[in-house]
Image (cartoon, rainbow, N blue to C red):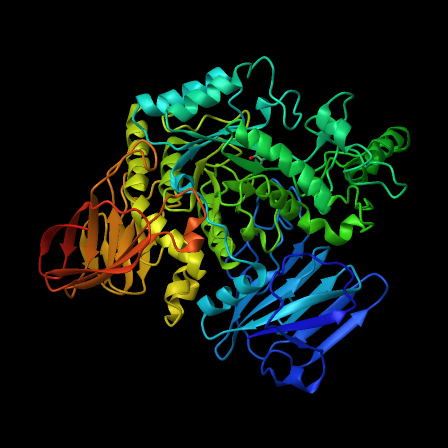
């Protein structure tokens, strides 16, 4: 059940909600409203011309999960959060706001369970009882907002309803689940090809190579550097011939330069404006830039055409960066600094730093917030949807029936309709392995199923051990992309000598073995609205202990992953909500806490009892060749169920039912294959079932 509450008089549409049918609209404070027990006791609203504050008493203390990739503890209860998309590039435990706004959380108390989605795309603050008085407070800088209360029996059901409201996930191409290599930057086409060739020469599987900002001519979007990427068409061809896909970065800032086509087309037509009607300007990588107003349909159309052109040149995917909007400085800032030079003295101490902008994070300073959109909307009221509309525009640059590989750094609720996200500029810190676990689980809980982080860490220098542990973790998350920053130590799998290269190869190879399982779980999840990566409690919510486990997660419904995130450790404690097969040792462990071994070459991970995991042979890239299937069967009591999904992996024909889905039931020595659907070309394969039971290990071979 979804209730819509309208507070004050909302004056902007975030466009996050697609489905208003079947939503019960409630007026705060009428009788109906108070009938929803436990949620609406004692509501207080205050407003003045600048802000609107809604305060609510909560009857029971509880836990809250969600808000996407914010930092801080996994359980969000007890803190205040700001939603104001910001390029906040040091993810220390208190860094807030960050790049994205997903103002949705799921509240869980003893007697209640519900989701709260506060749909407001401007400045929003949500205080989840930071004062400890069992009070939640929603504050906006605006005249009104819409909130949805989603009531469901289970967390799964609440998330499903949230996706009913904000839209289903768009399915990524199958190759997006292969390994991906990135770096800021591979500076020349020669370098790009060298990296790609190294993967093939060293027999390390890889599907995608990324191009960061240096492929462009002076950072001009939709251009190529004439010197370093002189033969980019040839480069693309060579990469494709070797089975690679290419993803190129796209920033929103358009360089102000006479005769630069994109600028000339956009000027005085498609860009955000100053209050006086002139195009707004800021400084980003290209120098002086202007920003397309993606909120306007005609601008999205114009932009999507450019994406389409680049796509037809052979660029397979895109990553949208700097779209918070991240702006280094504006004319106003420069003026202020100039004034400062004359007026301020060292004696002014901290004031000097604050005023000149040399302290604090870039976006925390309100740069250009009086910008105006083409439809007259003031930017600060819709700021959090800038990235959302940018990726939406890229989405339109593809053929309707084609799957997109699109990720964005800045986002807002509903972004899953157009693409996925990565968590921005993390560090090569041990703490960030555990942080990223929390962030990715939280992204899944706000409905973004294709998510990932810079594996290995973006800023700072990785050590060999850290990289191994980060890669082990990364090999079990939806987007397995290694990325690192300019000036940091290289992080390609071979960067730490032979011994580590061997370890890294094993990690990546294992990822490729798991592709049939990963892809099956992902696609069923896209269709049925459950995430590929999830916290334990998502699948085991009747077990209260799972809510306290924030350093393990599940990949699909059957694998429990327990990364090592501290140096020097060769053991860790794991919690199993159900008996499971240790996939390293191939022994069963019972429900409960265990200390398990975790030497550097192993990441503890478990296959839940009663399930089947289909795996394939290692290949250099996804779908390089046909493969037999080896199915690991975790059947303590001689019983297990598994699924196997297949389709073309690149089109949206799955929406028309053109796929195969088999349910495989193992019971007492017999395998039964049930066709749930067989609407796609199917070539029979040899399946080798490796069955683990409490008594013995056995094998069954058959063609399916
Ligand atoms: O100001 O394009 O998060 O992934 O490598 C830094 C350069 C701009 C930030 C992105 C990062 C990317 C980098 N970008």
In the rendered image, residue 489, in percent from the top left (x then y), is placed at: 47, 26
Foreground of the two, 621 or 334:
621
In the rendered image, residue 306, in percent from the top left (x then y), is placed at: 63, 32
In the rendered image, residue 649, in percent from the top left (x then y), is placed at: 39, 43
Looking at the rendering, the quadrant in which ligand 1 lies is top right
Task: Count every numbered label the image shows and give the total.
Answer: 0
- Residue name at image x 68 percent, y 42 percent: 300
Q: Is residue 284 above or below residue 380?
A: above
Q: Hey, which quadrant is residue 468 in on the image?
A: top left
Q: Is residue 438 above or below residue 151?
A: above
- Residue name at image x 58 percent, y 81 percent: 38
- Residue name at image x 72 percent, y 43 percent: 298
In the rendered image, residue 563, in percent from the top left (x then y), is placed at: 36, 48
Foreground of the two, 533 or 162:
162
Left or right of residue 136: residue 698? left
Quadrant housing the N terminus: bottom right
Q: Is residue 575 above or below residue 479?
A: below
Q: Is residue 550 visible?
A: no
Q: Hey, which quadrant is residue 565 in on the image?
A: top left
């Amino acid at each position: 059940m979804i209730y819509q509450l309208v507070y004050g008089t909302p004056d902007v549409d975030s466009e996050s909600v697609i489905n208003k049918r079947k939503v019960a609209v409630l007026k705060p404070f009428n009788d109906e409203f108070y009938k929803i027990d436990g949620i609406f006791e004692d509501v207080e609203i205050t407003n003045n011309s600048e802000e609107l504050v809604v305060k609510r008493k909560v009857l029971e203390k509880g836990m809250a999960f969600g808000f996407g990739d914010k930092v801080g503890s996994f359980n969000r209860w007890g803190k205040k959060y700001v939603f104001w998309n910001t390029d906040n590039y040091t993810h220390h435990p208190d860094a807030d706001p960050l790049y994205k706004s997903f103002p949705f959380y799921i509240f869980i108390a003893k007697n209640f369970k519900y989701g709260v989605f506060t749909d407001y795309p401007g400045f929003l603050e949500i205080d989840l009882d930071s004062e400890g008085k069992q009070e939640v407070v929603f504050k906006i800088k605006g005249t009104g907002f819409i909130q949805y209360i989603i009531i469901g029996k289970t967390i799964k059901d609440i998330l499903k309803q949230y996706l009913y409201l904000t839209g289903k996930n768009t399915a990524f191409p199958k190759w997006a689940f292969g390994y991906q290599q990135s770096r800021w930057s591979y500076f020349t086409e020669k370098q790009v090809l060298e990296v790609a060739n190294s993967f093939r020469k060293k027999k390390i599987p890889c599907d995608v190579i990324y191009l960061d900002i240096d492929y462009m001519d002076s950072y001009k979007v939709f251009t190529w550097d004439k010197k370093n990427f002189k033969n980019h068409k040839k480069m693309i061809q060579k990469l494709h011939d070797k089975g690679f896909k290419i993803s190129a970065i796209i920033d929103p800032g358009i360089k102000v330069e006479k005769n630069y086509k994109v600028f000339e087309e956009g000027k005085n037509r498609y860009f955000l404006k100053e209050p006086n009607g002139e195009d707004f300007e800021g400084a980003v990588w290209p120098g002086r830039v202007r920003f397309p107003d993606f909120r306007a349909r005609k601008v999205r159309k114009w932009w999507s055409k450019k994406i389409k052109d680049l796509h037809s040149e052979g660029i397979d995917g895109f990553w949208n960066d700097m779209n918070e909007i991240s702006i280094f400085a504006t004319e106003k800032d420069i003026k202020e600094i100039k004034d400062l030079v004359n007026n301020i003295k060292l004696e002014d101490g901290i004031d000097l730093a604050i005023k000149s902008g040399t302290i604090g994070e870039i976006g925390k300073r309100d740069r250009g917030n009086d910008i105006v959109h083409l439809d007259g909307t003031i930017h600060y009221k819709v700021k959090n949807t800038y990235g959302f509309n940018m990726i939406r525009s890229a989405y339109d640059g593809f053929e309707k029936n084609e799957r997109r590989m699109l990720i964005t750094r800045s986002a807002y609720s509903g972004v899953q309709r157009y693409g996925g996200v990565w968590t921005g500029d993390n560090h090569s810190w041990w703490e960030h392995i555990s942080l990223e676990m929390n962030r990715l689980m939280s992204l899944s809980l706000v409905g973004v199923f294709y998510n990932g982080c810079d594996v290995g860490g973006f800023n700072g220098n990785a050590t060999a051990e850290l990289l191994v542990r980060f890669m082990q973790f990364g090999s079990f998350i939806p987007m397995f992309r290694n990325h690192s920053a300019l000036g940091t130590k290289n992080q390609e799998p071979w960067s730490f000598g032979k011994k580590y290269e061997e370890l890294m190869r094993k990690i990546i190879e294992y990822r490729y073995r798991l592709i049939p399982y990963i892809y099956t779980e992902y696609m069923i999840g896209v269709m049925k609205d459950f995430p590929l990566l999830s916290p334990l409690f998502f699948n085991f919510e009747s077990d209260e202990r799972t809510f306290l486990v924030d350093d393990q997660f599940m990949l699909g419904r059957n694998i429990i992953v327990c990364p090592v995130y501290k140096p020097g450790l060769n053991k860790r404690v794991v919690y199993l909500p159900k008996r499971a097969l240790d996939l390293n040792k191939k022994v069963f462990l019972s429900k409960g806490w265990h200390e398990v071994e975790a030497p550097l070459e192993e990441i503890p991970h478990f296959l839940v009892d009663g399930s089947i995991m289909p795996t394939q042979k290692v290949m250099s890239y996804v779908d390089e060749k046909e493969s037999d299937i080896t199915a690991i069967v975790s059947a303590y009591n001689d019983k297990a169920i598994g699924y196997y999904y297949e389709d073309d992996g690149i089109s949206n024909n799955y929406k028309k039912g053109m796929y195969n889905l088999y349910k495989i039931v193992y019971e007492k020595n017999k395998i039964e294959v049930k066709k749930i659907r067989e609407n796609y070309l199917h070539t029979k394969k040899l399946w080798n079932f490796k069955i683990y039971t409490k008594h013995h290990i056995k094998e069954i071979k058959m063609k399916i």
